[in-house]
């Protein structure tokens, strides 16, 4: 025989099973006007808070709103800072491009990119496969392995390099630094351009490389133009 108290307990257990947390959440989602209909009860709701004991639901909403506003303000500040930096980079690279178009030999190019690298607090190197200058010369066969593994589809490489790889390009590469390496040459590779930073996280694979790619394209054009001119004269 079932007593009244047993029936009550059983009914309570059944109710707890039906009114679980997910059911409450689902109900509130399906009834967005619930709190507006229960405005008096809403002001009485108290929720445990680790630092402030108990707070109202309205207080929690206001706190979340303040946090969201602070987050948006930080994002806005970051965007402004990035835009300012991008504008400064655009001016530096544009000036370098104008100066490059007035160059008559590779040594004038080196002067311009050295100045640009100094303005960016970077190191730079330019190596050519067919140069007679020992300081510029890079043996093509020696660079082939790097080319196949790093410069996939002639795309710039950004990131860290192993010590032997870095020493192919730099006589004193930055320890634990990061690099961007770009192939030179339009129809065929004739050299490599690289910038290096002492900061190991400076050059990242997801970085925008538009400015430096344009620089490499201009240098490639100049080298091919000089080679063609020399061949015609010879």
Image (tube, grey):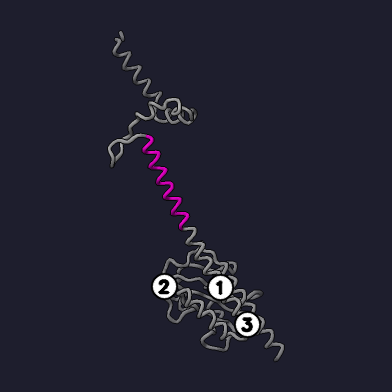
Find out whether the residues at labels 1 and 2 contact each other: C-beta distance under 8 Å. Answer: no
The percent coordinates of residue 143 (x first, y second) are: 53, 77
Circle 1 residue? 93
- Asked which secondary structure carries label 3, the reply is loop
Circle 3 residue? 102
Measured along the vertical axis of the image, is residue 56 above or below residue 145? above
The region drawn magenta spans 57-77
Earlier along the polypeptide chain: callout 2 or callout 3?
3
Find out whether the residues at labels 1 and 3 contact each other: C-beta distance under 8 Å. Answer: no
What secondary structure do most residues of the magenta stretch adopt? helix
10 Å crowding of disc 2: few (<14), some (14-19), many (20+): some
- Asked which secondary structure carries label 1, the reply is helix
Please report the residue visible at 34 percent of the width from the left and 19 percent of the height from the top: 12
The percent coordinates of residue 173 (x first, y second) are: 43, 77
Between marks 1 and 2 in the image, the one whose residue lies nearer the viewer: 1
Circle 2 residue? 198
Report the disc number at residue 108. Answer: none
Between marks 2 and 3 in the image, the one whose residue lies nearer the viewer: 3
Please report the residue visible at 47 percent of the width from the left and 61 percent of the height from the top: 81
Please report the residue visible at 59 percent of the width from the left and 76 percent of the height from the top: 97
Please report the residue visible at 28 percent of the width from the left and 40 percent of the height from the top: 52
Earlier along the polypeptide chain: callout 1 or callout 3?
1
The quarter of the picture where the C terminus appears is bottom right
**How much space separates mark 2 and mark 3, taking CA atoms?**
31 Å
- Asked which secondary structure carries label 2, the reply is loop
Residue 215 within the segment the image draws in magenta? no
Q: Specify the quadrant of the image occupied by residue 96.
A: bottom right
Numbered disc total: 3
Measured along the vertical axis of the image, is residue 82 above or below residue 117? above
10 Å crowding of disc 1: few (<14), some (14-19), many (20+): some
| Furthest residue in direction bottom, as rendered | 234
**How much space separates mark 1 and mark 2, taking CA atoms?**
21 Å
């Amino acid at each position: 025989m079932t007593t009244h108290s047993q029936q009550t307990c059983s009914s309570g257990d059944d109710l707890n099973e039906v009114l679980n947390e997910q059911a409450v959440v689902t109900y509130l989602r399906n009834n967005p006007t619930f709190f507006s209909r229960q405005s008096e009860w809403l002001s009485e709701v108290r929720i445990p808070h680790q630092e402030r004991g108990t707070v109202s639901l309205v207080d929690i909403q206001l706190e979340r709103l303040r946090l969201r506003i602070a987050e948006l303000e930080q994002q806005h500040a970051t965007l402004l800072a990035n835009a300012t930096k991008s504008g400064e980079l655009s001016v530096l690279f544009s000036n370098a491009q104008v100066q490059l178009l007035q160059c008559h030999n590779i040594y004038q190019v080196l002067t311009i990119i050295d100045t640009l690298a100094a303005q960016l607090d970077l190191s730079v190197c330019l190596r050519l496969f067919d140069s007679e200058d020992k300081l510029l010369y890079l043996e093509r066969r020696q660079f082939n392995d790097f080319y196949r593994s790093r410069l996939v589809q002639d795309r710039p490489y950004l990131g860290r390099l192993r010590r032997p790889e870095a020493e192919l390009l730099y006589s004193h590469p930055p320890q634990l630094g990061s690099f961007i390496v770009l192939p030179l040459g339009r129809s065929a590779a004739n050299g490599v351009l690289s910038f290096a930073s002492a900061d190991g996280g400076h050059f990242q694979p997801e970085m925008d490389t538009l400015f430096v790619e344009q620089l490499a394209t201009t240098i490639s054009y100049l080298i091919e133009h000089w080679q063609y001119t020399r061949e015609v004269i010879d």
